Image (tube, grey):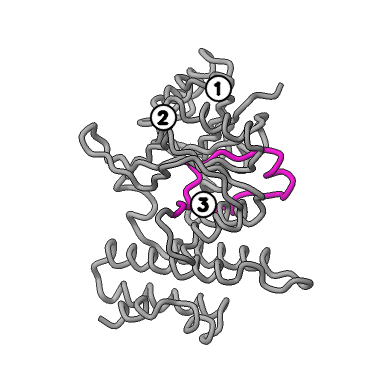
């Protein structure tokens, strides 16, 4: 039976947050919501808590992945079980304004656009501290390719778009038509998914009246660092490049692709230098990164498209 909206929640050991997340969805002003919680191999009480919620509410469904495969894989499994006209993805520790999904689906109903995007507030775990991360002051419908430029920041504008999927609602038949899914990993998966949805979308609504609340946890993926961060980035860039290069039309959205590379490297360097204090370890990570980059790009590609300031940071 079809519903208005399906919200997919991937979770790994989220017993501390899952009940709050489900409550935030049950109390949305839009009531016609299917809630799919994908347990990504949790070893805590997550599955038991969701099972209790499902016994109390028919619109809550637990899907178990078996072993921990990563956020991207868990979201894809949720997509397979979804029955909504629209699809949204919410992380277990985040939440949406109470009118959020009603406002966003209503906008898409009226405009016929493929994607709706709302504001993002960053939360830090208390009621005192909250700040706007991305804000849209007026309702607007923009083209997908223009949104791609705002995502990759290839031009200077007053507002940009986050690669996060949590502040977005997608038309389900749009995702199915183009076969858009997440890369099966837990880092950089939002970047590729959002890039491709903008690449294929005809129109996208910016919705200023509501916001997703993004909880900034110190234990999140980008607050630690391993080689997996580099491996996942390279995998994402390789897969995305394969999609964008066509034998008939050449390299589509090449400027945006390399802008994504440059921004991603900036984020990666920030993560290395903020999480790893050992100089020898920093050198090892940077050396490994350069080795991997040179398997995908030529030196000329990197010199042409990377901000020299990125390289300057390596020598200061």
Closest to the camera, between mark 2 and mark 1, is 2
Q: Residue at coordinates 74% horizontally, 46% vertically from top-left? A: 177
Asked if residue 45 can be seen in this view, the reply is no
Which corner quadrant of the image does residue 21 belong to? top left
Span colored in magenta = 160-185
Give the left or right position of residue 226, taking residue 255 as reference.
left
- Find disc 1 in the rendering and name its residue: 60
Taking the spot 38% from the left edge, 41% from the top edge, the residue there is 214
Q: Is residue 24 above or below residue 294?
A: above
Circle 3 sits on which residue? 190
Q: Does residue 96 sit above or below 28 in this rendering?
A: below
Element assignment for label 3: helix
- The residue under the point 55% across, 58% down is 148
Above or below residue 83? Residue 267 is: below
Sort mark 2 into few (<14), some (14-19) or many (20+) by Cα contacts within 10 Å.
Answer: some
Of circles 2 and 3, which is in front? 2
Whether residue 27 is situated above or below residue 132 in the rendered picture = above
How crowded is the residue under tag 1: few (<14 C-alpha within 10 Å), some, or many (20+)? many
Q: SS for tag 2?
A: loop
The residue sitting at the left extreme is 128
Q: Position of residue 274 (x, y in %)?
A: 27, 63
Q: Residues within 10 Å of mark 3 (few under 14, many from 20)?
A: many
The answer to which of marks 2 and 3 sits earlier in the sequence is 2
- Which residue lies under the disc numbered 2? 97
């Amino acid at each position: 039976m079809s519903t208005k909206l399906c919200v997919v929640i991937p979770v790994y050991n989220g017993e501390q947050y899952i009940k709050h997340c489900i409550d935030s969805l049950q109390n949305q002003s839009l009531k016609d919501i299917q809630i799919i919680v994908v347990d990504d191999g949790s070893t805590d009480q997550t599955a038991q808590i969701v099972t209790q919620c499902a016994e109390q509410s028919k619109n809550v469904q637990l899907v178990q992945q078996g072993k921990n495969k990563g956020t991207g894989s868990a979201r894809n499994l949720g997509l397979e079980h979804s029955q909504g006209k629209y699809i949204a993805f919410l992380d277990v520790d985040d939440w949406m304004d109470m009118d959020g999904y009603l406002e966003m689906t209503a906008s898409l109903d009226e405009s016929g656009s493929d994607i709706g995007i709302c504001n993002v507030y960053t939360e830090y775990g208390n009621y005192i501290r909250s700040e706007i991360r991305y804000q849209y002051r007026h309702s607007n419908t923009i083209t997908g390719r223009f949104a791609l430029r705002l995502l990759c920041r290839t031009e200077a504008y007053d507002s940009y778009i986050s690669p996060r999927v949590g502040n977005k609602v997608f038309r389900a038949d749009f995702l199915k038509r183009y076969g858009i899914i997440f890369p099966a990993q837990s880092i950089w998966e939002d970047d590729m998914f959002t890039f491709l949805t903008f690449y294929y979308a005809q129109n996208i609504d910016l919705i200023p009246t509501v916001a997703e609340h993004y909880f900034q946890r110190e234990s999140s993926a980008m607050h630690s660092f391993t080689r997996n961060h580099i491996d996942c980035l390279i995998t994402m860039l390789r897969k995305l490049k394969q999609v964008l290069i066509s034998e008939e039309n050449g390299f589509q959205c090449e400027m945006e692709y390399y802008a994504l590379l440059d921004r991603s490297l900036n984020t990666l360097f920030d993560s290395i230098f903020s999480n790893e204090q050992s100089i020898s370890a920093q050198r090892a990570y940077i050396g490994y990164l350069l080795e991997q980059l040179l398997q995908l790009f030529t030196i000329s590609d990197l010199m042409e498209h990377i901000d020299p300031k990125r390289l300057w940071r390596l020598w200061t």
